[in-house]
Image (tube, rainbow, N blue to C red):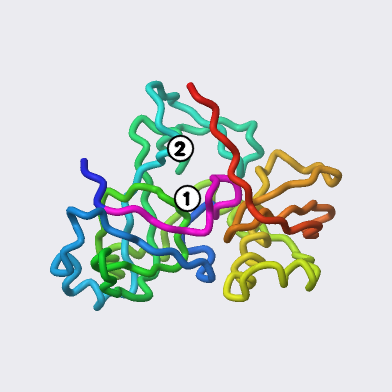
């Protein structure tokens, strides 16, 4: 397996990333190929497609062991499901699959073809193994049954984002930030109205609390990366 590209997104950390791809069309990201794969001919014809598949690595979840069951956060973190019945990052092979909307392909000096995509659910710097075109006639199944995922997919929050705090974000990121928060970044098993949460997005740490289905932003500060402990 070869890493052919890496994504550049507004998410420096795992917390707060949408749980599935395609949910938030407001999110934009850039796919930048590794030097070996920057030949524009490799993307010839891709511009004719509206959506693409990204196959990538859960780079922050690589481990030597695995468990046959996991605790999906959307089930409250208390109900075990088989790992192959979930999209948990903790898998025997940490491979992710995302369908994103292809907005543009632009050849940039020194980088080759750069893909701008919408709706990606990948952390900044995530390694990508492959890119494939999305084919609606075979990849789309509107009548599919989606197990327990059908029961929890419509959960959303009302967002109160004070204008003076919203103005601290780049203008082109504000709608995306509101849509992101409405999806409720918290694990489903955490519901403490007194707890302050924070999600890193677009160079800022957005801090908030949630009570009675309403998420209220209380602070927006510049994002400061936390130092990782050496193993």
Q: CA distance from mark 2 to mark 1?
A: 9 Å
Q: Are marks 2 and 1 in contact (CB under 8 Å)?
A: yes
- Total marks drawn? 2
| Highlighted range, magenta | 5-18
Q: Is residue 21 above or below residue 115?
A: above
Q: Which residue lies at the image location 60% right of the left edge and 39% below the top edge?
A: 226
Question: Which residue does the image show at 19% across and 57% down from the upper left?
Answer: 37
Query: Which callout, 2 or 1, points at the residue further toward the start of the chain?
Result: 2
Foreground residue, 25 or 72? 25
Q: Quadrant of residue 84?
A: top left
On the image, the x and y values in percent for residue 129 come to 27, 48
> Is residue 11 located in the magenta-colored stretch of the structure?
yes
**Image quarter hosting the N terminus:** top left
Q: Residue at x 73, y 40 (%)?
A: 190
* Mark 1 surroundings: few (<14), some (14-19) or many (≥20) residues within 10 A: many
Q: Position of residue 229 (x, y in %)?
A: 54, 27
Give the left or right position of residue 15, taking residue 62 as reference.
right
- Vertical position of residue 111 compared to residue 172: above or below: above
The image shows residue 4 at horizontal and vertical percentages of: 24, 51
In the picture of the structure, the residue carrying the numbered disc 1 is 123
Q: Secondary structure at mark 2?
A: loop
Q: Residue furthest front?
A: 110
Residue 100 picture location, percent across and down: 39, 64
């Amino acid at each position: 397996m070869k890493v052919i590209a890496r994504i550049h997104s507004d998410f420096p950390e795992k917390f707060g990333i949408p749980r599935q791809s395609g949910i938030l069309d407001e999110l934009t990201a850039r796919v930048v190929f590794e030097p070996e794969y920057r030949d524009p001919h490799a993307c010839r014809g891709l511009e004719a497609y509206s959506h693409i598949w990204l196959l990538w690595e859960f780079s922050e979840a690589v481990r030597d062991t695995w468990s046959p069951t996991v605790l999906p956060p959307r089930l409250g973190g208390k109900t075990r499901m088989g790992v192959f019945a979930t999209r948990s990052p903790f898998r025997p092979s940490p491979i992710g699959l995302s369908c994103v909307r292809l907005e543009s392909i632009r050849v940039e000096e020194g980088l080759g073809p750069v893909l701008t995509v919408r709706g990606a659910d990948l952390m900044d710097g995530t390694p990508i193994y492959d890119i494939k075109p999305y084919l609606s006639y075979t990849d789309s199944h509107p009548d599919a049954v989606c197990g327990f995922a059908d029961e929890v997919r419509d959960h959303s929050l009302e967002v109160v984002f004070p204008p003076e705090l919203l103005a601290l974000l780049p203008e082109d990121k504000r709608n995306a930030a509101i849509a992101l928060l409405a999806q409720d970044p918290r694990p489903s098993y955490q519901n403490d109205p007194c707890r302050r949460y924070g999600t890193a997005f677009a160079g800022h740490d957005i801090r908030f609390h949630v009570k009675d289905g309403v998420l209220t932003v209380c602070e927006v500060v510049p994002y400061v990366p936390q130092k990782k402990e050496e193993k």
